[in-house]
Image: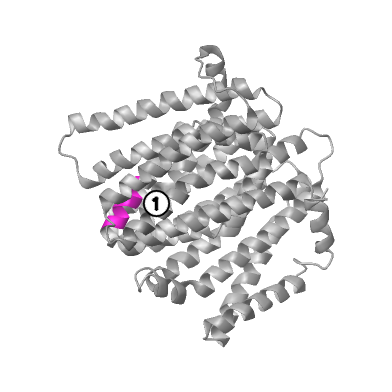
Amino acid sequence: MKGKLVQNLSVNFVQLILNQVFGLGIFYVLSTGLDKSSFGQINLALALLLAVFNILSFGIDQLVIKKIASGTSVISILALYIGHVLLTGLIFYLLLLSGTIFFPHTNNVYSIILLIGIGKLMIFFSTPFKQAANGLEKFRLLGYMSVISNLIRCSGLIIVALLHNLNITSIILIFIGGDAAELLLCIYLFYRSTKIPLIIKWDRVNYIKLLKEAWPQTGVVLITSALARFDWLFIGFMVSAIKLAEYSFAYKVFEISTLPLLAIAPLLIPRFTKLFQQNIIPVDKLKFLIRIEMIVAAFVGLLLNICWSPVIDEITAGKYGAINVKTIFILSLCMPFLYLNNFLWTINFAKGRLKMILASFIITFLVNVIGDILLIPFWGNEGAAFAFLAACIVQTIFYIRKNNIPELNNIWYSLMISISCALLSGFAIKMLLVNRWQAIPATIIFYITLLFVTSQLRLKDRQSLKHLFFQ
């Protein structure tokens, strides 16, 4: 019989596949249907809004998952979180709206931010229900909640594109409609599934207590939100919307390629929280899990580079393929570091080491910002990608140095071996083969062979996978 972990992973993976397919459809229609300048302006607005609303969560979203997983009353914690998103979300949008009073002659980007912000506010209001479902490990419910907005936006954009009516106005209306539908569906599905009453109650004492508890994580959220989109904002405001369009295309595909990480990451917080409440930590299983993650991360990055230029140029009529070859190569090197950082972050978050996590993100943020400021003016998009890679490497080094589980001190071996095998496979196949359809299977065979030679992959791993995913 399948264990709960593999069931949750399967459900989460399905919803992620659907979300990524719909998201890819949205991204493809926008990137090919709009000129680079308009596409860059929309991405600049989205980057700014997503960063702001992530910051407005104050880190309470992750804390809610942890609290519910550890047995805290869902009703009380959900009421506090609903009150928080309503308060902070409305204050932010009123401040944003007031800009039209003080600055009546706003530019096109500000108007786009103002309008798309309505939809993103709806998404922000829906987060308490999603995080509560995550903490309860109701991943099927979470999947239903998470796909509706992308489904509506993707369908709507395809329809208007086929009708040759794709423009900024129609795009904004579709975005707002999809986001509002997600909020309404989240409320309906959550109550129907859990029967938990939706209470909006102002509890000043417990709210302040929650904010204090989340304070270290608030700093983490502030830094990660800025880290995730600082390069986009810097390129958009300081370089040009066209360069942002090119960089955001490469970065979006890079984000989509992290699908395996997106599938497993939400499952680790509640599971690790329960795991570290026990006296005995299954170190061997943890080491095996990170070794498999490194293999997958390096493999995805390898395929991304092998297929990039011919495939992307073909589907975008030459707009975003060849021009982003160097950018996507640098970004793909970040992938194994992101997997390892998420793994170590989850361990430390589950153990309550929030101040240490905050310090790691402050250092990472500073490296990324300084790198962007120094490198983007000279190397453009490639400079932004390299600054992000440097930040990921620094964060990995910090986590490993601060690790307090001695048996995990050498997990960086798996990181370096997997990256080396992927690089060697990619360079060797590109030198030997020109046809990409021959290169793909040859690359896979070469990569797997190197993994066995280096003992990164072993025959007994099949049995270990059964023990990890089946109870």
Q: Is residue 78 above or below residue 350?
A: above
Query: Quadrant of residue 145 in the image?
Result: top right
**Residue range corresponding to the magenta coloring:** 38-45
Element class at badge 1: helix
Which amino acid, mark 1?
Asp
Q: Residue 414 appears at what percent x and percent y?
A: 70, 60
Q: Residue 419 appears at what percent x and percent y?
A: 62, 66
Residue visible at 47% across and 65% down in the picture: 328
Q: Judge by depth and name the residue closer to the eye, 420 or 6.
A: 6
Q: Is residue 334 above or below residue 113?
A: below
Number of residues whose C-alpha sits closer than 10 Å to that of mark 1, classed few (under 14), some (14–19) or many (20 or more): many
Residue visible at 66% across and 29% down in the picture: 68
Relative horizontal placement of residue 233, taking residue 145 as reference (left or right): left
Can the viewer see residue 377 in this picture?
Answer: no
Q: Which residue is mark 1?
A: 231
Q: Is residue 251 above or below residue 453?
A: above
Can the viewer see residue 440 in this picture?
Answer: yes
Q: Judge by depth and name the residue closer to the eye, 418 or 73.
A: 73
Q: How many marks?
A: 1
Q: Judge by depth and name the residue closer to the eye, 288 or 152.
A: 152
